[in-house]
Image (cartoon, rainbow, N blue to C red):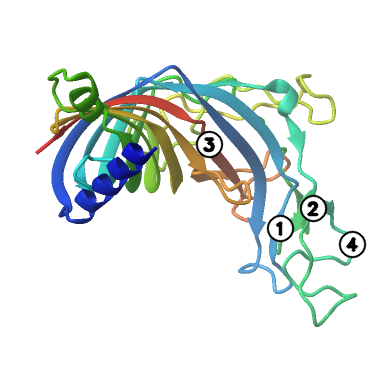
Amino acid sequence: MCRLSLFVLIFCLSNISYAAKYQFFLGLGQSFGTSKLTTDATNQMTKNTGTVNEKGGYFYTNTQHGSYEGSVKNITSAYTGVEVTFDKYGIFTARGYITASYSNNVNFGNLDKNSIRDGNLEKCRPDSNPGLPSDSNPNGIGRECWRDEFSTSGEQNSVTFNPNPGFSDTIAKNAFMLTYGIGADIGVNLPVSFFIKNYMHYKIVTLRIGAYGGIGYEFITYSLGKFDNRSYNNTTSGATTYDPSNPGTPTNAAPAVLNTQDSLYIAGAGMFARVGGSIYITNHLRLDIGVKIPITFAGVPNARSQKWYLQESIYGTQNTFTQQMLKQNLTTQVDMQWHCNVNVLF
């Protein structure tokens, strides 16, 4: 017992007198396994009549929701940063880094037809005007509600909204993912070589085994094709409109006219956490195996996209007063990613 106490005392005193060591490092990593990619899609027809009608406003239909489940594979990452060792034996470390990664193997998956549903907005009463004071509340702001028609000052007093066009069976199976971010980790290591040299009297290279954890912040994009704002929809052709009241059942409504050459661009940012294990072989090589976990607050996804498409009315006369806007939103969230990294320290 006394011998152990003496060892701990000597160990602590030697560490106190040690000046922190700084090492620049470069790293290269590769993911293994498959990360789940979930996408929520919404459609909504809208019309702003404020410029053509003195009583006009912003009108919209109920939202239509659907979801996809896909995957991301083969993520390649690069790292550069500085690692600080605080003690003589390399037990306590900290590092800060910047990173970039990409994958050419992003599959957004297939539409879950059972997920098609209408939103939970309330339908407007006759005296309601969403976003504007109503007859029953002239000094207030109208509550959020939807209509199936809008008023104009054109040839017709009211125009029926086109139906929501539904969703295609797929979004993209070969999109490109790019991320770049910053992060910081702290580590605790066991100096294996120190104990082997002093208690087993074998000479080996410096060897440490430990664990690390940290957080970071990154920007992420998913893209496909060349952007063209004249194109209609960022999905494949042949979409089917499904009945929200009877999930999985196609309706007889005309599907959207879709353009197979349209682009896809989804972008966002968010925090992530990293935890894993490290093996130091000499003082100049570190191997990391761990997992990267996205951090979300209040269910906010880490990447979003919104596209607007002008539509002519499919009912009656077609003119500028009956034109309407389809707003399509895509929100994505990638699941945890397992990775293996090799880092060279200088």
Q: Nearer the viewer, mark 3 or mark 1?
A: 3
Q: Which amino acid type is marked by label 2?
A: Arg
Q: CA distance from mark 4 to mark 3?
A: 39 Å
Depth order, front residue of 189/24: 189
- Sequence-earlier tag: 2 or 1: 1
Q: Position of residue 281 (x, y in %)?
A: 18, 25
Q: Report the amino acid beneath label 3.
A: Gln
Q: Quadrant of residue 190?
A: top left
Q: Which residue is mark 2?
A: 147
Can I make out residue 197 in this image? yes
> Residue 126 bears which disc, if any?
4
Label 4 or label 3, whichever lies nearer to me, is: 3
Quadrant occupied by the C terminus: top left
Residue 108 visible: no
Pointer 3 residue: 333
Callout 3 crowding tier (Cα within 10 Å): few <14, some 14–19, many ≥20:
some
